[in-house]
Image: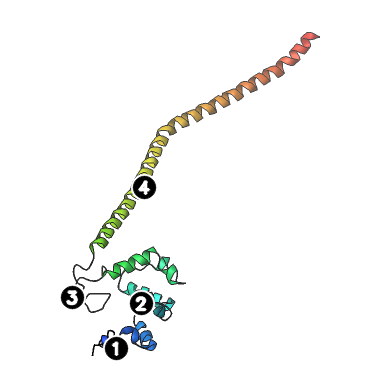
Amino acid sequence: MQPPTSLPRSAMTPGVLFLDLPPEIHMQIASFLSYPDALALKHTSRHFYNMVYTGVHLKVNWLVERFERKLECPMEKCSFRTDEVFCNDRVRRIMERRRWHLECRRVPGGCWVIEGQTCRRGLIPSWFKRNRVQERIDHAGIWVREAVIVALIAILIKIFCILFTWALPWLTIGLIHESLAESSGMELLQSMHVLVLETIPQWAMFQR
């Protein structure tokens, strides 16, 4: 008798698969996960998407845990309404670094992802290292551009101060000359006015 070509699932694999567990066990296991792990499990299938909790309480606990461990904690730019809004560029970068154990302590038992474990060396793939190098170059370029802009602004302010200091005496002299000219002109007009007033009666008497 030929053996059957397909065996029952329970006969093919020893033990019980994770998906074969009751939903109550799934929910109990998911309740022990931190936010990044719960979010990863949630997006593995529709079954876990409708089951795994990734609400505000779990997000806040994750941020508090990172703050207590003195890790990067973007609390000032987080919106807790949905996972899509919460996972902005900075949070995605933090999760990517956590996924590759870049935040873990390089000591025995210093893993933050699986507590009590020791991170293996050479865990980071080469493509991710290249991305990190490119990211650092981009950040360095931004800092260089900002430094150049600040330096140019400082130079322009310095040049303006030098020109103002050089031109201030000449402006003062010009204002003094203008004031003297205006005062001399007023005195001349007053003198002519007095002269005219004195001359008109004499001219009238001469005409008679």
Name the outermost residue toward the bottom: 1
Task: Look at the picture and state if 110 lies above or below 76.
Answer: below
Q: Which mark is residue 46?
A: none
Viewport quadrant of the N terminus: bottom left
Q: What numbered label is drawn on residue 41?
A: 2
Q: Which residue is mark 4?
A: 150
Which percent across, then down, holds residue 190?
64, 23
- Specify the amino acid type for callout 1: Ser
Q: Nearer the viewer, mark 1 or mark 2?
A: 1
Assign a secondary structure to mark 2: helix
Estimate how packed mark 4 is, as few (under 14), some (14 to 19) or many (20 or more) residues with alpha carbons within 10 Å: few
The numbered disc on residue 108 is 3
Q: Secondary structure at mark 3?
A: loop
Residue 185 in sight in this render? yes
In this rendered view, identify the residue nearer to me: 160 or 121: 121
Report the front residue among 95 and 123.
123
Could you tell me residue 21's position as x and y percent?
A: 34, 87
Q: Which residue is mark 1?
A: 10
Residues at marks 2 and 4, CA–CA distance in whole angstroms: 47 Å
Secondary element type, mark 4: helix
Count of labels shown? 4
